[in-house]
Image (cartoon, grey):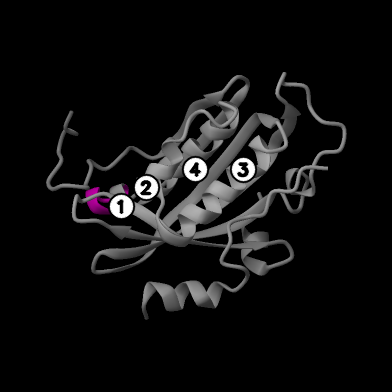
């Protein structure tokens, strides 16, 4: 089954989650591949008081590491865009086509309203669901219950959006990625499933 067919089976809108406020690598074998990472959590800063934690799965080989990293890097970069009040646009390097439009709209939801965020966003249960030539599907779980929407000075807004609160704060994410001629994997399309979808329920810890 093709990646597009697999994504269609996930259902829902092709848009990413809607936002409504109220040198060389050691062991590298080919362009776009990286040495397998050790499993476990990795936390990076995305802005003042804002962090992203990625739990790297075990058993990834070098090629699958590159595929998973494409999504993990994008997810962190997306929050860096929010934490920098839209100044950091590196997230756009990781997306193309429909995914680029959706990612831009999501970040724009923050910047247009003069909002930022604080807290901890978590990405886990990452896996490469399928690979078909230069295309692949990545499945992941996301928990954003630790994120608070703030004004630009960092003060949480009084009416936090529903996506920051359980059960909607945890969801199942699917990304279709494609490897370009430069060997880089970029995201082409997003799908997600929110509570009460069974896949979202499986992400709840």
Q: Nearer the viewer, residue 177 or 102?
A: 102
Q: Nearer the viewer, residue 29 or 41?
A: 29
The one nearer the camera, 165 or 85, is: 85
Work out whether mark 4 precedes mark 3 in sequence or the reverse, and give the earlier one: 4
Q: Residues within 10 Å of mark 3 (few under 14, many from 20)?
A: some
As helix, strand or loop, the secondary structure at mark 1 comes to: strand
- Give the spatial CA distance, label 4 vs label 3: 15 Å
Label located before the other in sequence (2 or 3): 2
Name, please, the residue furthest toward the front.
112
Task: Classify residue 129 as left or right of residue 84.
Answer: left
Q: Is residue 205 magenta?
A: no
Q: What secondary structure predominates along the stretch shown in magenta? A: helix
Give me the residue at 23% from left, 42% from top: 34
Residue 63 magenta: yes
Q: Residue at x 60, y 47 (%)?
A: 106
Read off the magenta span.
Answer: 61-65
Pointer 2 and pointer 3: residues touching (CB < 8 Å)?
no
Provide the residue designation for mark 4.
75
State how far apart marks 3 and 1 are (Cα).
Answer: 24 Å
Q: Which residue is mark 2?
A: 70
Query: Is residue 3 visible to us here?
Result: yes
Q: Earlier in the sequence, mark 1 or mark 4?
A: 4
Q: Earlier in the sequence, mark 3 or mark 1?
A: 3
Residue at the far left: name it: 29
On residue 185, the disc is 1
Compared with residue 34, is residue 14 higher up or lower down, i.e. above or below? below
Q: Could you tell me if the residues under marks 1 and 2 are in contact, i.e. CB atoms within 8 Å?
A: yes
Q: Residues within 10 Å of mark 2 (few under 14, many from 20)?
A: many
Q: Position of residue 25 (x, y in %)?
A: 19, 34
Report which residue position mark 3 lands on: 108
Nearer the observer: mark 3 or 1; the answer is 3
């Amino acid at each position: 089954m093709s990646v597009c067919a697999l994504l269609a089976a996930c259902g829902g809108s092709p848009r990413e989650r809607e936002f409504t406020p109220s040198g060389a690598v050691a062991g590298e074998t080919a362009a776009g591949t990286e040495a397998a990472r050790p499993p476990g959590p990795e936390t990076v800063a995305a802005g003042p008081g804002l962090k992203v934690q990625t739990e790297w799965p075990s058993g990834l080989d070098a090629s699958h590491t590159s595929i998973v990293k494409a999504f993990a890097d994008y997810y962190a970069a997306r929050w860096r865009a929010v934490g920098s009040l839209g100044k950091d646009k590196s997230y756009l390097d990781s997306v193309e086509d429909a995914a680029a439009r959706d990612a831009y709209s999501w970040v724009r939801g923050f910047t247009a309203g003069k909002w930022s965020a604080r807290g901890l966003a978590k990405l886990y249960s990452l896996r490469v669901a399928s690979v078909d030539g230069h295309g692949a599907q990545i499945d992941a779980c996301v928990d954003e219950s630790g994120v608070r929407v703030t004004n630009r000075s960092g003060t949480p807004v009084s009416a936090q959006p529903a996506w920051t609160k359980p059960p909607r704060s945890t969801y199942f994410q699917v990304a279709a990625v494609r490897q370009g001629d430069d060997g880089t994997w970029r995201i082409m399309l997003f799908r997600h499933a929110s509570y009460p979808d069974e896949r979202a329920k499986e992400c709840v810890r």
